[in-house]
Image (tube, grey):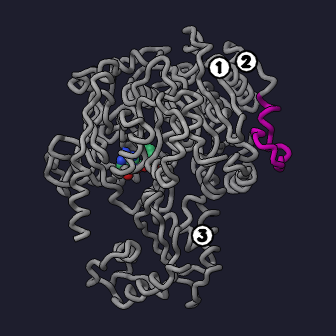
Amino acid sequence: MAEENQNIAALMVEERQYPPDPEFTAQANAKPGFYEQDPDAFWEKEGRDRLSWFTDFTTLKEWDRPYARWYLGGKLNACYNCVDRHVENGLGDKVAYHWEGEPVGDKLTITYADLQSRVVRAANGFKSLGIGKGTKVAVYMGMIPEAPVTLLALARIGAPFTFVFGGFSANALGSRMAEMECEYLVTQDAANRRGKAGPLKPVADQAMDMAPTVKTCVTVRRTGTEVELKEGRDRWWHDVVDGQDDDPASCPCEPMDSEDMFFLMFSSGTTGKPKGIVHSTAGYLAGVSTTHYYVFDIKPDTVYWCAADIGWITGHSYIVFGPLVNATTSVMYEGTPDFPDKDRWWDIIERYQVNVLYTAPTSIRTHMKWGDQYAARHDLSSLKVLGSVGEPINPEAWVWYREHIGGGKAPVVDTWWQTENGMILVTPLPGITTLKPGSATRAFPGVQAAVYDESGREIPPGEGAGYMVVKEPWPAMFRGLYNDDQRFKDTYWSTFPDAYLAGDGARVDEDGDFWLMGRIDDVMNVSGHRLSTIEIESALVNHPDVAQAAVVSRSDATTGQAIVAYVTLKDGARGTTEKLAELREHVGTMIGPIAKPANVVFAAELPMTRSGKIMRRLLKDVAENRALGDTTTLADPTVVEEIKARAEAGKED
Ligand code: WT7
């Protein structure tokens, strides 16, 4: 009976619809008819109007599957588009960032003129160290003003970068720098996190030992934590940057080709090695700024806040480049949402009169868990649009977000995209789209998304689930995997002859709305971030006591998915609580704290097929506490029963 009720409830949830408010529609950036535009004419116009070119492009795009090129023949500079031209156009006094440090009262208002002067000084400083066009630079920072300043300064010079999320370990940073062959690293002493200083420079020191190409490291003093500076390699940011000329003429913006590599962003894949996803200059900037403008309904006076971290693609596209191309005023917050109390976000929204909030379902669920009272303490009536990204948003969280944060009226835009995509691909448009909680609704104009069955046929609306694909290239599409063309072709372009394989399951309902259903490969989604099972297994097996490891995910009310590791110890050793803690720490050190397994189950053996493959599917059944699926291909069927018994016995741990 209980189960029957749940099904009915689920159906009812799916049927809830929220048509646009006519008042919103009347002022929306996207006008009726927006979806009927010719895609090429649309991107041509956006590319010309939204970006400033040193040399106009001559050809909109070339598509030699799987290689796309956009805005060919054009020359431009990302920093010029994000900063200089706004100052030249009289927007120097407009606020670019309301930056808020984690310590209460620590804030900074950065206008476009301030941003220009900071960026020019940084660029001159970097140049003085030998960074020039084409020099590869790694950035390992938290959410401090120097983070966007660094990216813009590198863009100004034409130096490609990779920004590694500050929560990643030395191993993760080191391997990424080595893979890209970075010559420079920009970091900070430590980052403020929930009232404590989390070390970054000491981690960077270890990482540099793994990446001998790095010759020079520049460190911002943020917390004042003591750090070691290595003679001949390490420099303070203030020594390199502070005394530099801030006249924009002293450091002109380097004209870059539309297709020049802009940056690399490493992302988890189905094998141990992270993929170096290559983004281009012009197509990326056009894609992120166009989607930013329409999806969040940006006006000249909008105060916009993307509460992600700059270290993820969301931060690159929607904290830095998209909003700055559009000369938007953003909020940037350094710390955690519960410092000093659980209403910090709502306090920020009230003080800066934020109009748009863009965050992840995992954060929304965390706020739900903390309770409505924190948001209720604040006036959130400035909010007009709410965004969600990172994983499917469950309808309860969607409705809570709209009710408790959006005053029961703000449209929630559930935006589907990936690191590879660079920009939002499937999303409602506020003022136009009828919203459905849990559905990302429609492909953005000019984007040809579809759902295919196994044989590569498009599944018509209302006829079930299949593989999420994109049939035509889009401007911000990644241009490949760094130094690994074969993997690029194999991963994304070999399953179907005529489409990009996203790796997500999806269905299209009778109205033509997309419902995303999570990853179909061995990649998990924890708190809105992709982690590969194999990477975590490799980290576990790297521990001297571990013989075998298998990692799966189970559903989790807050993080979406949680990591469960099944581990066999060497020499038949028995697992202990201490060993469990040690293995979690080990994974944290190897990859980063977000990769630490929520549970570790010790097993004498792991379930294998006769051909020696670990049957993760069965381990997932155990992790999810459900009846075991087909066990007929198991080499030894007793193994999984034993694991099940252990998993149950271990629950008290
Ligand atoms: C994967 C991409 C895009 C920046 C953050 C994550 C999942 C993302 C949604 C959404 C359902 C979503 C997908 C996708 N995902 N947004 N709105 N609805 N699923 O970037 O680490 O490259 O992960 O996140 O599974 O493939 P990423």
Query: In the image, residue 124 lies at what x, y percent?
Result: 72, 24
The residue nearer to you, when weighing 389 against 115, is 389
216 and 645: which one is in front?
645
Q: CA distance from mark 2 to mark 1?
A: 8 Å
Q: Which label number is shown at residue 584?
A: 3
Q: Residue at x 60, y 73 (%)?
A: 583
Residue 188, position as x, y percentages in the image: 73, 43
Residue picked out by circle 2: 246
Task: Identify the amino acid type marked 3.
Answer: Arg
Residue in the image at 71% along x and 30% along y: 126
Mark 1 surroundings within 10 Å by alpha-carbon count, few (fewer than 14), some (14 through 19), many (20 or more)? many
Q: Residue at x 64, y 54 (%)?
A: 174
Please report the bounds of the magenta region as a residue range.
220-241
Tell me the element at label 2: loop
**Left of 343 or right of it: where is 75?**
left
Q: Is residue 629 visible?
A: yes
Q: Amino acid at mark 2?
A: Asp
Which residue appears farthest toward the right when viewing the image?
231
Is 232 contained in the magenta span? yes
Q: Quadrant of the N terminus?
A: bottom left
Above or below, comparing residue 639 to residue 537 in the picture: below
Q: Which mark is residue 130?
A: none
Which of the numbered marks, if any, corresponds to residue 116?
A: 1
Q: Secondary structure at mark 1?
A: helix
Question: Is residue 77 in sight in this rendering?
Answer: no
Q: CA distance from mark 3 to mark 1?
A: 44 Å
Answer left or right for 108 relative to 535. Answer: right
Residue type at mark 1? Gln
Where does residue 218 sit, x and y in percent of width and height? 75, 39
